[in-house]
Image: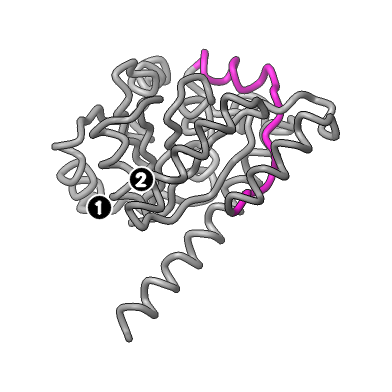
Amino acid sequence: MRTIAFVTQKGGSGKSTLASSLAVAAQEMKEKVCVVDMDPQGSLTNWARTRGSDDIEVVASGAARLPSALASFASKGCTLAIIDTPGADGLPSTAAMAAADLNIIACRPSLFDLWASAHTRSALKALGSDFVFLLNQCPPAQQSARVRDGVETLEEMGALIAPLILSRVDYQEAARHGCGVTEFNPRGAAAEEMRGLWTSIRRRLARVRSRSGARCAA
């Protein structure tokens, strides 16, 4: 089972919204997906309740229970675990960072978010955990100076995964209905973004696993 975590030590970056739509997109692309909700706000737990289906299992967990939650999912044959974390420093975020094969630092194109992303990057590097940046909630005019500055800053700090995620109504409406954007509006631009994001993450996970295997063999 591969594990990814959405980690940003600042609220409002859109981690829960991304996690819910990514879970659905990955499931539609033949993954058996499970979700661990470590955020005290319980956004994904509420999303699952609204969804009213057991196709994607969501469990709430603190730091101490995370290893057993992941082990339980693996024993059920899950192929992908997605962890949503609080927007703050603390044991839950640290536990998720250490457990994930790949950490996704969601960041809006704003100065405060970029500062918070740099802080999260430092924490991940101290743990030796793999990570990528994801620029989220970009204004529709993708070539704005604010977005360009965000892209340049994140690329300087580390890997920036594609595509950029624009600020679109579909993301909020899908979450409100307990859906992912690929269900809510399958032919919409947001759905294409989310399918593209899962494809990029899947490729990155394959590289992470390949490097881990090479280290073990050595």
How far across and down, in percent of the image, does residue 132 sit? 53, 49
Figure colour scheme? one colour
Viewport quadrant of the C terminus: bottom left
Residue lying at 25% horizontally and 52% vertically, measured from the top left: 74
- 170 horizontally vs 177: left or right: right
- Residue 144: x and y in percent read 84, 29
| Local crowd size for mark 2, using a 10 Å CA cut-off: few (<14), some (14–19), many (≥20) | many
Q: Where is mark 1, residue-wise?
A: 74
Q: Residue furthest bottom?
A: 218
Q: Earlier in the sequence, mark 2 or mark 1?
A: 1
Residue 34 occupies quadrant: top left
**Disc 2 secondary structure class:** strand
Q: Is residue 44 above or below residue 197?
A: above
**Res. 85 image quadrant:** top left
Magenta range is 159-177
The residue under the point 35% across, 52% down is: 126
Label 1 neighbourhood size at 10 Å, few (<14), some (14-19), many (20+)? some
The amino acid beneath tag 2 is Ala
Q: Disc 1 residue type?
A: Ala
- Place residue 123 in its image quadrant: top left
Residue on which disc 2 sits? 81
User: Taking 148 as reference, is 202 left or right?
Assistant: left
